[in-house]
Image: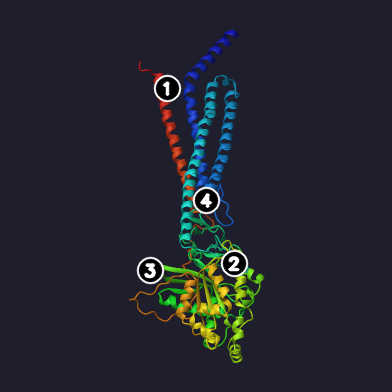
Amino acid sequence: MQGVLVLILIAVWAAVMWLGFAYVFPVLFPVTLVVAGGAALGLYYLHACRTLAPSTLEGPSPVAAPDVAYRNYLLSQVWRDWWTITRTVVPKVWTTASRTVVGLTRTMLLGGPWGFFAFPVWLALCAGIAAAAVPAAVFVLALTVLYGLLAAVGLACWLACVLVLAAVERGFMAYGRILQTCPHPFCYERIALPEYECPGCGARHPRLAPGAAGAFRHVCRCGARLPTTVPLGRFRLAAYCPHCGGRLPERIGRVRVEPLPFVGGPAAGKTTFMVLGIRALHARAHAAGGRLSFVERRHAEAYAAAMREFQRGGRLAKTGPELPLATMVDVEVPDRQGTGRARRILYLFDPAGEHYTGATEVESLRYLDHGEALVFVVDPFALPQVRRALTGKERELVDRAAMSSDEDPADTLQRVLNELRSRPDRGRQKRVAVVVTKTDLLARTEIGRGLDDGVREWLAGVGLGNTVRTLEQVAGRVRYFASGLGAEPADVAELLTWAAGLAPGTAPADAPPAAEAPEPPGTAPLRAPWPVRGRGAERVPAGYRLGRLAVLGGLSLLTVGTVAGAAVAAAQRLSDLTMLAHPPF
């Protein structure tokens, strides 16, 4: 009797197994596969939205605030976002699937005698859950490919923009022959790229150029968006020397800096000629429809004090012994063709004459390394031959009216030329202006009467013939000029514009006569400051937001495509099963 019962149970079990694998398993397995895959997909998409949707620095994938500027999203943060999503979802899917399989096993197989009959159902459910790992892995791989494709396309566009912008700026700098140097004492270095100050928080950006932090804009740690090139407006930011930290002139990088050293011994009249030159250049620029402005207020104040001293008939105070800060003058005049503007930032270096009295002192004047022009100021009464030619009465007149030194101008120039020869170009100068000062006083002496025959000939006749020939060998062009308190301002302005490399035009013939140039020249801002615009320090940059939305959009399309494909496949499978169950014949 027991044997018969066992046979019946075996027959029933076999029938149940046949029914389960023939009818239940083919239906339950794909349904479980679709449900498990859909659950994994939904979980992945949910965490992707949580990771990519936030626009603040905090979130599942936090964005670290940078020291200075944010890096391009596609260089690092995009992969942090991918890793955050992956490391969150994959363990959670694995844990959920494992717990479900263990729970089904305990409930269906080990929960009682019916476990022998529930095997097809258990196998269909567990196999469906396990098989769902394949489409889930394919989906994760597709998402990784999507990330890689987005990063590759974005980085290619970014690199193209970086190269184009860098080429445009290089072309702009080359076309304008833009030179950038530091005007501050103990530095005087040539500058490839200044440090720029963020107008929002004051942070210094040492590499504000197309690069890893952005092509068109860099985003400061405070959220302000800053231009990366001069044509895009970088010159509107406050600039600082990267070597010494000193403030640089406005518009640096947009206008060529022209170092113009005044070379001469003690009491040669360098400061006097420089002040007279600024006044003449200011009047010339104003008359031509241009302008001249001091970069720093202290220089405008020093100039105004010097002009008041001239009006009182006094002498200017002797220049101090410290290394000079360049007197920075921004000049803009119409060009000779009348189609544009000729612009320069002039660095007028006027050190004490004692800096030219020794080789070591001259070596400290590092600004000589960068210029292509200089003004050689000659005190005629410092020339040995002139001093010997003066009569007692003339000597008394000179001593009473002006100061002079015992430093031979030929020795001064030789020291400067020796220092210039250490340059790669062996000290070549494009333009040298030789200025003989105190000619109003020199004309009252016998030896000074020959000055009317020409400054060059007069210098050669008083012992500077070798010096003149040496200058004409190292300079492309040399001009000679006789200067005194009565020198014509137009002639002084013409000499300085030539030495500075400017080619100013004149006002149009039909233009109304210009008013007298205001004295002293102002220090008005020469460019509009860069406006502070951005998303704020607590929010991610717009590039990060755009990148995340692009990834989320691609993920949404991938999710919709996957769901649609799964639905079509399920419908096709159901149709096949229906055909098998109810054949047409």
Residue type highlighted by circle 2 = Leu
Mark 2 and mark 4 in contact? Answer it, CB < 8 Å: no
Q: 534 or 212: nearer the eye?
A: 212
- Quarter holding the N terminus? top right
Q: Is residue 330 visible?
A: no
Q: Is residue 39 visible?
A: yes
Q: Dot 1 corresponds to which residue? A: 577
Give whichever of discs 4 and 1 has the lower sequence position: 4
Q: 199 or 173: nearer the eye?
A: 173
Give whichever of discs 4 and 3 has the lower sequence position: 4
Q: Dot 3 corresponds to which residue? A: 337
Other-residue count near label 1 (Cα within 10 Å), few / some / many at <14 / 14–19 / ≥20 = some
Q: Dot 2 corresponds to which residue? A: 420
Q: Looking at the rendering, which quadrant does residue 448 occupy?
A: bottom right
Residue type highlighted by circle 3 = Gln
Q: In the structure shown, which secondary structural element does the residue marked by tag 1 occupy?
A: helix
